[in-house]
Image (cartoon, grey):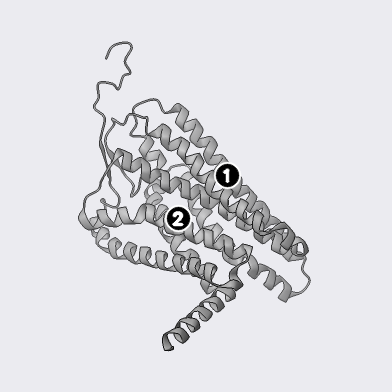
Amino acid sequence: PTMAEPAWSNRSSILEIVLLGFAKVPELEVLLFPLFLVAYVVTMAGNILIMALVVADQHLHTPMYFFLGNLSCLETCYSSAILPRLLASLLTGDRTISVPGCIVQFYFFASLAATECCLLSAMSYDRYLAVCRPLHYAALMNGRICLQLAAGSWLSGCLATVIISSLMSQLAFCSHNEIDHFFCDFTPLIKLACSDTTLILVLDFLLASLCTLFPFLLTLLSYVYIILTILRIPSTSGRKKAFSICSSHLIVVTMFYGTIIIVYMLPKSNTLRDLNKVFSVFYSVLTPLINPLVYSLRNKEVKEALNRVVHKCVAFSRT
């Protein structure tokens, strides 16, 4: 190359990326296809059922279930951004994905993950008001505020990732074309770039801090206040009732953030690098699957709503 040309200009750009997935353990792939297929079907069915119940049952027209309906909608989209592509590659053995296709998959995965962080934070604020400010709850968590918090969560996640994805689409990818992962994540994709990535790395750090670290700290702060309030309740039954209000949400938050911290924030030792895929399965496959189970099995109101719908369907079928 001449002095004016970048060092990578004489290398041809790659058009396709190979997602290695679980190719290192081919005997495991035979088991993974039925497992992931069942996980996807159950995730979709469970989350769609919760959305339908929240819309159809008047008893669930409260802020808590409004946010839960949003979370279920997000989880169906989140699973659909990763699992159908993974299932197809496990079934056909075709691990290739076009570079634009890879960036699009990253966009949907990252924007939905950022939205989930904001949404979980909004839900923890709702639980904080329910436990710590019960007398002011109705005034502080009205329909307009619920809509603003939900819309703000979706918008912030989508807009932050649009900036990163549009910058990513302008990069030249001309390194080797293999990614040792089962979906297009930021770090392995950026490693394939052979143009300058300084700006995108700085922006990614700032936006990731804004859309994940800030909501995480708000969620943590909400639970500190919730736990302190619960500990001050004199009766055991009162403490149990207060804790049951937020226990389902706390389980989901712990699972989601726990695996994200392990995958993205801990130093990359060889052992952790090998386990990264396992933990990625946790937050991309198991969390969306467990959410509806946690909220339905541990929640009396959801069970009652489901019973009412079943009875209505049975009565309708008999007429």
**Image quarter in which the N terminus is found:** top left
- Answer few, some or many: residues within 10 Å of disc 2's Cα (few below 14, many 20 plus, some between 14 and 19): some
Q: Looking at the rendered structure, which numbered label has been put on residue 44?
A: none
| SS class, disc 1 | helix
Please state which amino acid type lies under the numbered disc 2: Tyr
Residue 270 visible at all: no
> Which quadrant of the figure has residue 178?
top left
Mark 1 to mark 2 CA distance (whole Å): 16 Å
Residue 147 visible at all: yes
Q: Who comes first in sequence, dot 1 or dot 2?
A: 1
Query: Where does label 1 land, which residue?
Result: 213
Q: Residue at x 74, y 59 (%)?
A: 139
Residue most extreme to the top: 3
Image location (x, y in percent) of residue 175? 29, 31
Residue closest to the eye, 14 or 74: 74
| SS class, disc 2 | helix
> Which quadrant of the figure has residue 99?
top left
Image location (x, y in percent) of residue 282? 43, 57
Position above or below: 170 against 125: above
Q: Residue at x 37, y 49 (%)?
A: 274
164 horizontally vs 145: left or right: left
Residue most extreme to the front: 319
Position above or below: 194 against 315: above
Query: Where does label 2 land, which residue?
Result: 283
Residue closest to the eye, 315 or 136: 315
Please state which amino acid type lies under the numbered disc 1: Leu
Image location (x, y in percent) of residue 125? 66, 56
Residue closest to the eye, 144 or 135: 144
113 horizontally vs 80: left or right: right
